[in-house]
Each structure stands twice: as C-alpha cells, then as structure tokens.
Amino acid sequence: MPFISKIQRQTDYNRFPPSTPIVIDNGASYFRIGWAGETEPRVIFRNIVQRPRHKSTGETVTIVGDHDPALLKYFDCTRSGPRSAFDSNVVFQFEIMEYILDFAFDRLGANGSRVHWPEQIDHPILITECVCNPVYSRSKMAELLFETYGVRSVAFGVDAVFSYKYNQLHGICEKDGLAICPGFTTTHVIPFVDGEPVYKGCCRTNIGGYHITDYLKQLLSLKYPHHMARFTWEKVEDLKMEHCYIAPDYALEAQLFQKGGKEAEDKTRCWQLPWVPLPTEEPPSEEEIARKAAIRERQGQRLREMAEAKRSSRINELENQLHGLEFLLQQLGQVQEEDIPSFLSETGYASKQEIELTLTKVTQSLRKAKGEPKPEQAENEEKADSCTSDKYPLINVPDNMLTPDQLKEKKRQIFLKTTTEGRQRAKQKCVEEELERERKTQQDEERRLENPQLYLEQMHTKYKELYEKIELRKRLKTNGGHTNGSNSGGVGRGERLNAAQRERMRLLTTAAFDRGKGEDTFGAKDEDWQLYKLMGKDNDDDDDGADEDEAELARVSSRLQEIDSTFVPKLEPTASQPTITEVPHVRPLTKEDFQIVLGVERFRCPEILFHPNLVGIDQVGLDEMTGVSIRRLPSKDKALENRLTSSVFMTGGCSLFPGINERLEAGIRMLRPCGSPIKVARALDPVLDAWRGASLYAANSRFHQQTFSRADYYEKGEDWLRRYQVRYTL
C-alpha cells in the first residue's frame, strides 16, 4: 500500500531509546508528531485521507495529508474524495485513523506496514484529544494503539490545556484563567483554577475555522460563479488567513462598506487571477491593402476568363446542334410521305413538329448565349401559326363540317393548344426574367469594378432602406398605423386593420346606420348596390409592390454576401424567435474580469465566531461562552471570577485573526459588572503551542506515572478509561 506525499521520511528513529515518549497532537485540521523534549514536531500534515485508483494499473494508493497536485492526473479521484476521521472534533472513523497513524509512524522512521508491524512502536505515547472526549472514542484509540502498534503505554491530554500550561511558563497567562480555543470544527472554553482545568465549567459550540472557510467559499462562488473552479479549499483557506479580520463593531463596519468611500476602498483587497491580454491587431498598411486588391483583381480576371471560355464552349455546342437540326429538316423534306415514319425512327424524334420545336428552343438558347435581342413578334406568330395549323388541323374547321368523333378530337386539340401555349408563355417569361437578371448582374459588376468602395456603400444603403421599408409595412399592417409601440399585445381589432379594411368597415357601419333611421329601403335605388362594388374593390395600397421589394431585398442580400464577407443578413422574427431589437455587444475580457475583490467578505466570514446564527447554527458566540463557563463553576466567588476574566487566554488557529482580542475583550466587558478586570492575551504560537506544551509535559521524569501501560489495558479493560484523568501539574 504505497503512500503519496511530499514529506520526507525521518532517518534517526533508532537513535531514540524506548523510554523516549512520542508526542502526537491529533488535531481535526493538522496531525503533528515528534519526540518529547524537542521544540518542533518532526512531521506535520493535514489530517485527511484519500484512496484513489491508478488509471492504468487499477492499484489503490493512499494519499494522506498534503500531496503533489501534479500526480493526481494519473489517478481516478471521482469515487474517493478527501475523508477525515473526525466528527465535531471527536475521532469516530478509526479505519481512517489507522491510515493516518500508519503514515505518521512511517514518516517518523518506524519500520512496518498496515498489515503487519514487525517492529513494534516500543515507546510511550502522549496523544491529545478534545475536552470531555467520549469514553468510546478514547477506548477505541487505546485499542488501536495497543493491539495494532504494540505501544508501551498511552496518555491522553487536552490540546488547549497543554497550550495554556506552556504559555503559563512564559508568563502569558496566570494559574487562574479562561482558555478559549476556537479550533477547526469546534470552539471550547476551559476555566483554570490553581493551574488545573475545571471540566465542569467547560463550554463548547460547533463552530470553527472549517465553517469560516466554507462560508467564504460559498460567498465567493456566488459572487464569481464563472471562477468557481479556482476556489479550491486550499486557496480559500489561504485567502481566509491572509485577508480576513474581526471587525470591532460588525454593524458599523457593514455600514462603512455599504456607503463606500475612501476608507472602505482602503480595506478592500484584490486577488488577481492569471490573465493574458489578447494580442492587439494593427491596421493593415497601404502596401498590404494594395497587395490584397491586386490579388482580388487577378482572381476576378481569372473568373471572367473561365466564364468566357464556358460561354464560348456553350455557343459552339448550340451551333453544332442547330446545324444538325436544320440538316435533319432538310433531309426530312426530301423523304417520301410513306417513308417518314421509318426515317424518324432512326433519328429518335416522333414527328416533324417535335424537331421544329427543338430547333426553336436551341435557337432561343443560342440567342441567349450570344446576348442577341429577341426576334420580331411577327415572325414568332407566323411560325407559331404554321406549327399550330400542322399540329392541330381541326381547330379552324367549322363544327357543322365535322363528325361527332371529330368534334371530340377538336375539343381535345383546343385544350392541348391552350395548355401548350400557356406553358410556352410561362417559359418565355422565365427566360425573359433570367435575361433581365443577368443584365442587372452584369451592370452591377461593371459598377463594382469601376468603384468597389462606392458600390459597396450603395448596396449597404439600399439594403437598409429596403429592410426598413418592409419592416414599416409589416408594423403598419399589424398595428394599424401605430408605429411607436410594441407589435404584440395591447391593441384591439380596429388597430390591427389596414386602410382598405377600415374603409369597408366604415361603409358597412354607414349603411347600417342609415337603414336603422326608418323604413328599410336598401336596394330600391341602383346607387345602393354600388356599396358592394366599393367593398369588393381592392383599395389596399399598402401591399402594392411588397413582393417586388422582398425579391429585391433578397437579391441585394445575396449580392452583399458575395462581395462582403463581414455582412450578416438580418433575420425575420418568427413565433418561436422574438424580435431582436439590438445585437448584444460582446466586449473582450480585461484584467479586471480576472480580479477577485474581497470587501465585506473579509469580516463577514469570521463574524460567525461571535454570531453563529449567520450560518444557521443556533448557539452562542465566543464572548457569551465565557459568561456561560463562569456561571457553570461550582464556586460563586466574585474574586475568583475577577481572576478568571483578568487572564483570558486565546489559542487555536482561529485566534490568529486580527482584532479578535479587542473584540473579545469588548464582548466580555458587556457581560461583566462595571469595573471588572478584563485582560485578553493570545498564545505565543496558537498553532504549535499545544504540541510544545505536550512535549515538555512528556519530557518530565514523572510523566510515566500519568500513563497506563499495555499490561494495565489487558488487565483492567476499557472501563478503566472512564476514571482515567491525567494531572497536568507535575
């Protein structure tokens, strides 16, 4: 079971005799282990465990405490997050605790593994615990140390008491006093009388540094949701310890930031995230513009040459086809009447009329390709009449000269002729429209080549005018002339009618009103019937030219897309897509977008130490805890209470916040009688003084009298731990 850690393994474990105790400060946040008598612990790491699997081999590894983030890319951590052995400062997950102790003894230099320890930890152990630790947790810890690691003897002590005794030796606090320890998950207040803790007067709240960090993480995530991934627990913890402080008066401090100003700006801190500015694009030089224009001109010339070559090839093909059809008609004229069917079967045409129709189409296509004008209308009509007389012989014959079968055939020929002529007129119209579009396109291209910039501006202006014209027509048709409002909701039926519809409604209303005056004589005069003509007349001038405008808008839009790569046509609104009145402007990201500003969060998060209800914990704060602890003391001596408040001692990681001593002193002064002596002092090192005090305590020659050995454990059992209590004054 390999470990992943940046902590180096100690090499001098065998130099210490078995009588040298091992001191362990088992905190909910950090685990510290070292030798008694030393001033600094040998190994310090976070008291968490993570057991991911390797992505390639599937092997489970153990990550204890701090680790190298670069190594985590090789492991699957989705199913195994960081886990702690503590719940409200009480050890309850002893499987995790076993991993932590394995790692601690391994880094201290002991030889062994979790499965089997060939070399027992043959040293006395002093391990810290919380105030009034449950007997179950203490017995399981003793069982783990005796059964798994084979330690010689064990002693349990409270970390805050060791810190108090250590600072008492340095004159920071007195024999009688109050020790306040805001820890990682809980906060304790312990009264001291004659140098010994009085556990009956202890007080605890479930608030600590973990809740402050979590609260700060939530506030920053809500304030900057697009940077949420950067708010890792470690980074937020660093921000808390670097920037947070305790406000002397929370309400006044909040009002100060609410009003703003120079003082609030001075108290604001900024965390700059990594940011790389976007490269600035310089405008192209005149040489670059000229070079691109030359490239476009060469490309246009090449396209024109390709189009001309394609046109010449098409003309040659049509001329060859035309000559072939003329030669075929010439040969057909020389063939006898009875040989025509056999001759046509070899050519692939069904009749002479089909050949002539094909010849006409080829002639028209050839003229179109050459750009020649249309033939005279008379020639077309003469040719059409000749074709019609040959193809439909019964049309011009009177009905009295035809038999019933011939009359039916005549009706069929009339229907075919009408249908064919209509189809030909439609085709001719399409051809004319296509020629007109090509002519306009050619003229536009000539204008563009003469002055490209002016042509582009004119096309944009024309597109804008057509679009506004069509939109105005739609709004008028929808709102009935009300162009200053929204086009949806709030309009009646009369407002939605156009001008022609309103005129029809006026005529109907007038006629009904005149008829209601007296006798109904409508229709007696011929002028009355003119009403229906007026109602049926199409007076809707608003729709004139609407189709032409939309077609022209489509043509201009298509042309702009060809010559301008930056042009984006405006979309028409649909039922599912509302009208976009303004295109949202997307600005480039700047340096300010990657700044995390810490203002009111600096003092709002640690304020939960004094007002836990800010995070939903219905308990008292630090200042009120001192009053509760004093009231719980068996003795009601006023002199003792004054001695306790005159030596209020702060230890633990949360006591490092600036301003906490002044705020706590002001809070206690509000609870105590006027003139009571109050003094608040902070430990020399609130983080490590608990381990240093335990190290001095274990280095005393009489320390072995305060421990219970493995033989006592096997003889007396776990119930003996209920009566076990270490004495801190040796």
Image (cartoon, grey):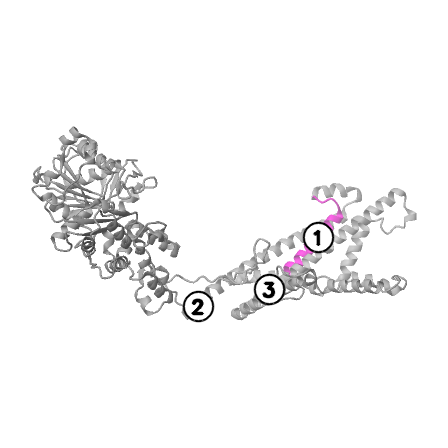
**2 vs 1, front mark:** 2
Q: Earlier in the sequence, mark 2 or mark 1?
A: 2
Amino acid of disc 3: Tyr
Question: Any magenta on residue 363?
Answer: yes
Q: Earlier in the sequence, mark 2 or mark 3?
A: 2
Please name the residue that numbered disc 3 is placed on.
467
Q: CA distance from mark 2 to mark 1?
A: 52 Å
Q: Residue at 27% x, 47% y: name it.
A: 204
Magenta segment's dominant SS is helix
Give the answer, above or below, for where 130 lies relative to 637.
above
Question: Any magenta on residue 461?
Answer: no
Whole-percent x, y for residue 354 in the image: 73, 48
**2 vs 3, front mark:** 3
Q: Secondary structure at mark 3?
A: helix
Is residue 288 or residue 118 the one in the foreground?
118
**Which mark, by number, is residue 359?**
1
Amino acid of disc 2: Ile
Q: Quadrant location of residue 24? A: top left
Residue 371 seen from this side? no
Q: CA distance from mark 2 to mark 3?
A: 31 Å
Q: Which residues are magenta?
A: 348-372
Asked whether, in this view, residue 413 is left or right of residue 122, the answer is right
